[in-house]
Image (tube, rainbow, N blue to C red):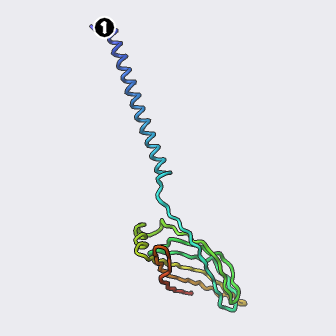
Amino acid sequence: MLDAGAVNGDLLADSKSRRRRRCCLLCCVAMLLVVAILMTVLALIVLKSVSLSLTLGVAASLENPNYASAKFNAATIGLRYCGREVGVAYGPPGSVGTRSTLDFNLTLDVMFDRMPGSEADLLADVIAGSIVLTTVTVVGVRVKVGFINQHVDAMVSCNVTLSFAVTTLSVAGQTYDSRIW
């Protein structure tokens, strides 16, 4: 026959062990949550990927060799590496007088995340000692002489080979191509 005191003692022992298991389980779950939150914070804030940023100062000039003044739309200057556009600058619209030149300064932001391939390719070009960049400038010009309006779009493409040394950066070669349509 079962003793009532023994049954109550077994029930108390079972409830204590259940409480201990429950407490241990809750502590483990809480610890896992803390570790998950810590990993998320580290991934989002501390362990960011390296982001390279480069801003170039561009000195551009627009020459008007004609005997009539000209108005021009906003110019677009693009920087290309391996055929893909990696930087862009926009020039302001304005006008240039007869037989004069208008100079303006722009900032061109290079977006390294748009570089084709991997950063290893760019690094290999730099280690090899030269890198080829292409700039493409497009501007629309409107000339008005009396009642005659003439609209012309001009594009200038320039291939520049930059040569790297330990302490110097020089232009090894450059070629220009221009089109007017």
Residue positioned 33% across, 15% down in the render: 10
> What amino acid is at disc 1?
Asp
Figure quadrant of residue 137: bottom right
Q: Residue furthest front?
A: 167
Q: Residue furthest left?
A: 1
Figure quadrant of residue 77: bottom right
Choose between 110 and 71: the one closer to the eye: 110
Q: Residue furthest bottom?
A: 67
Q: What residue sits right under mark 1 in the picture?
A: 3
**Is 134 positioned to the left or the right of 6 in the image?**
right
Residue 92 percent coordinates (x, y): 65, 75
Residue positioned 73% across, 90% down in the render: 146
Which quarter of the figure is the C terminus placed in? bottom right
Residue positioned 47% across, 43% down in the render: 37
**Is 148 positioned to the left or the right of 177 in the image?**
right
Which quarter of the figure is the N terminus placed in? top left
Mark 1 falls on what kind of element? loop
Residue 52 percent coordinates (x, y): 50, 64
Choose between 144 and 155: the one closer to the eye: 155
- Against 136, residue 42 (above or below) is above
Residue 86 percent coordinates (x, y): 50, 71
